[in-house]
Structures are given as C-alpha cells and as structure tokens.
Amino acid sequence: MTAALALLNAVFWIAVTLVGAALAAWAFRALLATLAPGDRRLWRTMPLPAAFGMLVVLLYALAGLLAPWLAPFPERAVVGDAYLPWGGDFLLGTDNLGRDVFSRLIFGARNSVGIALLTTILAFGVGATLGLAAAAVGGWLDTALSRLVDVLMAIPALILALLLLTLLGASIPNMILVIALIDSTRVFRLARAVAADIAAQDYIEAARLRGESLPWLVRREILPNALSPLLAEFGLRFCFVFLSISALSFLGLGIQPPAADWGSMVKDSATLITFGDPTPLLPAGAIALLTVAVNFVVDWQLHRASGLKE
C-alpha cells in the first residue's frame, strides 16, 4: 500500500511538473511573439518543446551572468557543518565541506556552461574551418587532414581525454584545449561532408570558371549553404562538450575544486544516495535539463532548415 501511494505521489508530481513546463513554454512563446523583432509568425508557430528549451537556456544564461547577485553565499565559502538538511538558512542544505549547495549550483551554471560554450566555440571554429578548407581545396590537403582525423577518431574520446589530461595536467586551459581538439574532429567530418556536396554543384563550377578566388567561393557560396546543418551541429556539439566536461569533473580531471562544477558536485555528494537524500540528483538534473533543452531548440532549427511543413 505504501509503495502504491509513493508511486501515485510520484506520478502526480511528474504530471504537475509537465503541465507547469508546458504553461511556462506557452507564456514564453507568447512573450516572444509580442516583443521579439522580426517575423512574429515564426515565434507564434514555434513548437512548445522548442519554446521550453529556449526558456531554459535563457534562465541558465541569466543564472551564470548574475551568479554573484543571485547566490546567497560566496562560491567557495564554508558556511556551516557538513551535510546539513534542506531548509532554514540553507535552502538545499550543505555539501561535504559545509558549503551552501544552492549557491554552488548557481555558480556551477557560470563555470560548467561558460567553459563548455568556450570549448565548443573553439572546437567548432577549428573543425569547421579545416573541414571547409579540405572540401574546397581537395587533393593532398584533404587527404592529410582526413587521415589525421581518422586516427584521432579511432581512439575513444573519453579515453583520449583522460590520457591527455593525465599527461598535461588537470587544469581548465588544458581541459579546454583537449576537449576542443577531440570534438573538432567530429565537426571536421560534418563540415567536410556538407561542403564537399556543395562544392560539386554546377553553380560552384560556374563561379570557378568566372575566375572567383577560393576564399570568395568558401565565403560567398559554400558557407551560406552549409550554415544550417553547421548551426544545428553547434548545438549538438555543445551538449556533448558539456557532458564531457561534467564526466571529467566527476572523475577528478575536469574543473578542479574549490570551483563549483555540477560534475564534481555529483561526485562529492554521491554517498547521500544510499541514505535516500536527493541532493546528488540536483546537479545531475541541472546537467540533464540543459542537455534536453538545447536538443529541443536544435530539433526545431533542423526542422525549419529541412523545409518540412507541420
């Protein structure tokens, strides 16, 4: 009987959460349709999952930017005893060192998301540039870059990251460079494949016969036509980078303490699961929610780029 009541209670709260998320997404979509510039029909016809994803991404960005003002305690301050319960002065209790969990969750948005975004931009810039160059130039450059990428992709990404960070040392600059290097290979493959298809089109050959230079072809013909799949890949790549950083932090080779990071927060409070304390689920849920939200937005952009109708 007790188990049945617990199940019904869980179903009830899940339903309430889903309804609340749908209402928040609907209100946010209506606000965008009213205030956003440009084509308002675009916002009015945006699917609710995409609106929910954009709302979550916006809230995470605001939390990261306004963390010093939103958090009730400093990021690294020890403010009480270890593992204090929820409530009172500490909304979500304290961690294994007595730091406020709620404050570290907010600062974790700045560290985890900010570093993941910087890493994704670096990986995407390197991978997309080399991929477009390989497809446009072809010949020995394409062969050399493709074989180098094949070698790097033959090694499992997490194992390669662990190996390189063990050799170079666990620091934020090293982690950014290592993950950007690994993920740039995935971006390279996509950019090269998309650009190669575009470079084989008749209008590209006509531009070559007109005497247009290679940089002009890439900038004016290939890149604009490859932009939609590349932007979608940027969103997906951000999710993979974000999850990689969280995994490395959980293993102790990512963002180093005392900086707040959601992956290390899961590791620090993992033992509480055995006592029925849901605290470790908070940073894990923050990671999962952002990943799902970004995928909602990416799916919408891919649907728009495909030209399909509802």
Image: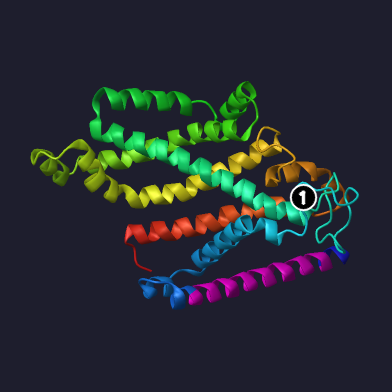
Closest to the observer, 305 or 56:
56
**Residue occupying image coordinates x 78% and y 69%:** 9
Residue under label 1: 280
Secondary structure at badge 1 equals: loop
Q: Is residue 232 magenta?
A: no
Instruction: Specify the amino acid type for callout 1.
Output: Pro
Quarter of the picture containing the C terminus is: bottom left
Horizontal arrangement in the rendering, residue 262 relative to residue 29 (left or right): right
Q: Is residue 28 magenta?
A: yes
**Secondary structure that dominates the magenta span:** helix
- Image coordinates of residue 276 in percent, x first then y, are 85, 53
Closest to the observer, 261 or 139:
261
- Which residues, given as a range, are shown in magenta? 5-31
Question: Which of the 4 image quarters holds residue 206?
Answer: top left
Quarter of the picture containing the N terminus is: bottom right
Q: Is residue 163 above or below residue 294?
A: above
Taking the view exactly as shown, the residue that stands out farthest to the right is 81
Q: Is residue 150 above or below residue 198?
A: above
- Image coordinates of residue 163 in percent, x first then y, are 61, 24
Question: Which of the 4 image quarters holds residue 128?
Answer: top left
- Image coordinates of residue 61 in percent, x first then y, are 57, 57
**Residue occupying image coordinates x 81% and y 61%:** 91
Horizontal arrangement in the rendering, residue 148 relative to residue 307 (left or right): right
